[in-house]
Image (cartoon, coloured by chain):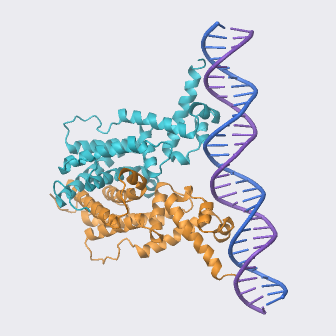
Chain colours: A orange, B cyan, C purple, D blue
Amino acid sequence: MAGSSKNREDTKTRLMEAAGEVFAQYGYRASTVRQICQRARTNLGSVNYHFRDKKGLYAAIFGQSLKLALTRYPPDLGLTDRATPEEKLRAYIHSLLLRLMGEGLPAWHGKLLAQEIAEPSGAIDEVMEYSIRPLYTYLAAIVREMTNEEKPAGGEESDRTFLTAFSIVGQCLHHHIGRHMIEALRPRGFDPTRIEQITDHITCFSLGGIRALTAQAPSEQGGLNS
Amino acid sequence: MAGSSKNREDTKTRLMEAAGEVFAQYGYRASTVRQICQRARTNLGSVNYHFRDKKGLYAAIFGQSLKLALTRYPPDLGLTDRATPEEKLRAYIHSLLLRLMGEGLPAWHGKLLAQEIAEPSGAIDEVMEYSIRPLYTYLAAIVREMTNEEKPAGGEESDRTFLTAFSIVGQCLHHHIGRHMIEALRPRGFDPTRIEQITDHITCFSLGGIRALTAQAPSEQGGLNS
DNA sequence: GTTAGTTTGAAACCATTGTTTCAAACACAT
DNA sequence: ATGTGTTTGAAACAATGGTTTCAAACTAAC
């Protein structure tokens, strides 16, 4: 029960900080344990001691960042339940973009998730069930509110709702996944309001998209028509 | 000048076929030369002989698939110049989805491009300039047709046009990049009409989005950016 | 058949990277 | 101060993967 004072926490903490940065930026596979240790100013033995192996380190980071992201950037961003669906959609998009394009610890989760979507690490089986699916079902509910669609009984969303949610998430994710391309295609200096601009764009674009879909095939429950 | 008959072409061809499949599926970095050789029923020496190294093999594949994709799936999909912008947009989306979700050789290019966007291989410097940028400028022109925006003089599209093009491409790419997630989230058997369904969805959604953006900040000199 | 150039197969080489090991350094209770 | 359990540092190990090498196999011309 000895040796549990400052320095142990120090090394473990430094390791997690370094690992978060590196995993978020390069993804699980492309990150190396040595790279992380170097950044944390420690060595391989510490990883083995504190986290057993690379997978263990990754899992620890993922779990921690998931918890943190849910408190710092909840999907509703602190809206009340009586907010309009439009407000909820904007909050959702904003929250997702903050997690994808933000800096530092609270943004790790989004970036890790994006990496998992593009190339599942295999280090955590529950990623899909406990991280991705909830995000989708929550978004699907917002969409259904706007299209006046019934909540399907079996839990399976309609194809239209699913594709719509996919369109919205796809737009957001692309701004992270394609960041190298964006930089090359259209270099721009650092702009702290950029995330808001993109939020406005995707929100407006998606609301228009949803309206168009609803007009094209109105919901059976007597949706509005053009 | 000898030995240039059947078997040489055979091995080289088999190598390129195998490499195309593997690179398109796993990306440059995650693919291994040994994996490719095994699939091509040859060995490492052949790669060194015919293509010098992994980069050379990749570059050969990329160039070939680019040429093929442009003839098989041109961005206008054979539309006449007098087609409406809406028709052109649908053709563009359809073409992109075919290249991303299709099977076999003609679909290599889209998948390779998606991988390059997500994680530039560094094996080809010209990817951005000669493969990605043209796709964007073409799409931007379609968008401008619909928003009645002037073609900007300096070649720099307006931010609104850029973000719109990005929203459209992002939706399409997501259906490829997130394919593992889709399968886990919503498993579905093989459906040959799926690409058409998604094309319809993204087209309708995006047309609605463009209308909404135009309504919000009408006509020329795009509205709300800094 | 001989010969010269081409192509292939097998092995080795070398750098990278995840993992393990173990002794030294350390912290703390006694 | 001593002893005990904890933590760290350095090295070694094993597996993977890109690259190189070179002799054997092959092809075509003579």
Q: Nearer the viewer, residue D28 or B42?
A: D28
Occupied quadrant, residue B225: bottom left
- The vertical placement of A125 against B99, above or below, is below
Residue ID at (31%, 64%): A199
In this rendering, position of residue D27 left or right of residue B198:
right
- The vertical placement of B126 against A166, above or below, is above
Residue A71 at x, y percent in the picture: 43, 76
Q: Locate the C terminus of chain A and report the quarter of the image it occupies.
A: bottom left
Residue B91 at x, y percent in the picture: 28, 41
- The vertical placement of A99 against B112, above or below, is below
Residue A174 at x, y percent in the picture: 38, 56
Residue ID at (31%, 47%): B199
Q: Nearer the viewer, residue B103 or A66?
A: A66
Q: Nearer the viewer, residue D12 or C30?
A: D12
Residue A217 shows in the view:
no
Residue ID at (20%, 62%): A223
Q: Locate the N terminus of chain A and report the quarter of the image it occupies.
A: bottom right
Q: How many marks?
A: 0
Residue ID at (55%, 70%): A17
Residue A209 shows in the view:
yes
Q: Nearer the viewer, residue A119 or B224?
A: B224
Residue B42 at x, y percent in the picture: 62, 33
